[in-house]
Image (cartoon, rainbow, N blue to C red):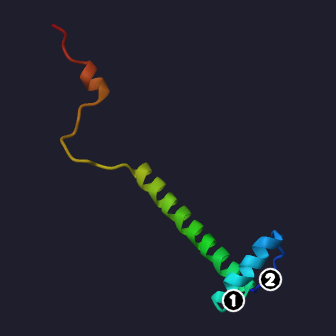
């Protein structure tokens, strides 16, 4: 299990004041508010990267969209000329 570590950030005084008010309204601390938001952002990015990787793998495999097998380029150009 991963441990927790402290992180120091610098914010404008006005942002800190408003963050304290917001945290108080939500009955939490500024630290918990920031930790929750960063955790959400990291999880959201992880999910996006995983979805992107799956999409790239699917594109690499290609899709069969139906229809008959089409002649190759060489077969098309080997036809008899009149």
Q: Residue at x 27, y 19 (%)?
A: 77
Residue 32, by quadrant, is: bottom right
Mark 1: secondary structure: helix
Q: Is residue 7 above or below residue 78?
A: below
Residue at mark 2:
5
Residue at mark 1:
24
Q: Quadrant of the C terminus?
A: top left
Q: Residue at x 82, y 81 (%)?
A: 6
Q: Residue at x 56, y 69 (%)?
A: 44
Residue 10 x/y as whole percent: 84, 70
Q: CA distance from mark 1 to mark 2?
A: 23 Å
Q: Residue pushed farthest left?
A: 82
Mark whose residue sits in front, 1 or 2: 1
Mark 2, other Cα within 10 Å: few <14 / some 14–19 / many ≥20: few
Mark 2: secondary structure: loop
**How many numbered marks appear?**
2
Horizontally, is 56 left or right of 11 in the view?
left
In this view of the protein, which residue sits in the foreground, 64 or 20?
20
Q: Is residue 34 above or below residue 24?
A: above
Q: Residue at x 26, y 25 (%)?
A: 75
Horizontally, is 9 left or right of 21 in the view?
right
């Amino acid at each position: 299990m991963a441990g927790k570590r402290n992180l120091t950030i610098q914010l404008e005084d006005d942002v800190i004041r408003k963050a304290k008010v917001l945290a108080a309204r939500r009955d939490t601390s500024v630290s918990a508010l920031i930790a929750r938001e960063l955790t959400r952002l990291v999880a959201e990015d992880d999910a996006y990267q995983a979805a992107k990787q799956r999409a790239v793998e699917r594109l690499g495999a290609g899709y069969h969209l139906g229809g008959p097998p089409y002649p190759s380029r060489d077969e098309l150009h080997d036809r008899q000329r009149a």
